[in-house]
Image (spheres, rainbow, N blue to C red):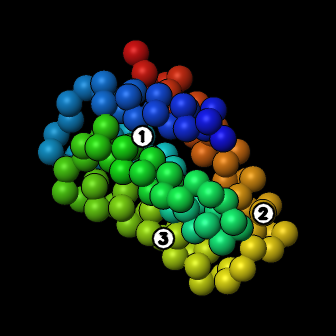
Amino acid sequence: MSKRIVILVVLALACAMAPARAQNAAAPFDGDLQRLAEILGGLHYLRGICGARDGGIWRNEVQALIDAETPPGERRTRMIAAFNRGYNGFQQTYRACTPAATVAIRRYVSEGSRISRDLTARYAN
C-alpha cells in the first residue's frame, strides 16, 4: 500500500511543478486527474466497508492532489465532483464487503497506479 501512496505523492509534486496555465483553461491531463480523483473516491468507500484500517487516507490523497495542482474554479469543482462520484457510485451498489468489492478495490488500485505512473512519466520534468 505504501508504494501506491508514494506514487500519488510523486504525482502531486509533478502537478505542482507544472507550468502555470490560464485561469480556467483545461490542462491536458485534467481527464486523468479527474479519473484518479474518482478512483480515490471509490477506494475511500470500498476500503472502509471492507474493514481496511486506513481511515481517511484516500480522501487525504485527493486533497493533497488538489492542493498540489491548485486548480481554479471549475477545474477544482470537477476534481471534487469526480471524487464524490466515485464514492457515491459504490455507496449505492455495496452495503457490505463482497468478493466483487474486493475485485473492484484491486482493479482501482491497479488503474490508479497506472494513471499516476503515466502522468508522472509524461509531465514531471
Quadrant location of the C terminus in the rendered image: top left
Q: Residue at x 70, y 45 (%)?
A: 110
* SS assignment at label 3: helix
Q: Residue at x 38, y 39 (%)?
A: 28
Front-most of residues 101 and 37? 101
Q: Estimate the x, y position of residue 56 in percent, counting from the top left.
A: 48, 58
Residue 49 numbered mark, or none: none
Left or right for 51, reference 29: right
Q: Residues within 10 Å of mark 1 (few under 14, many from 20)?
A: few
Which residue is disc 2 drawn over? 102
Classify residue 90 by image quadrant.
bottom right
**Badge 2 or badge 1: first in the primary sequence:** 1
The amino acid pointed to by label 2 is Thr
Q: Residue at x 40, y 35 (%)?
A: 12
The nearer-to-camera label among 2 and 3 is 2
Residue 41 against residue 3 in the figure, above or below: below
Q: Residue at x 46, y 33 (%)?
A: 9
Front-most of residues 26 and 89? 89
Distance, label 2 to label 3, CA atoms, is: 19 Å
* SS assignment at label 2: helix
Residue 85 numbered mark, or none: 3
Quadrant location of the N terminus in the rendered image: top right
Distance, label 3 to label 1, CA atoms, is: 19 Å
Left or right for 16, reference 88: left
Residue 37 against residue 94 in the figure, above or below: above
Residue 116 in view: no
The amino acid pointed to by label 3 is Arg
Left or right for 104, reference 38: right
Residue reaching furthest to the front? 53
Q: Estimate the x, y position of residue 47 in percent, counting from the top left.
A: 64, 62
Residue 29 numbered mark, or none: 1
* SS assignment at label 1: loop
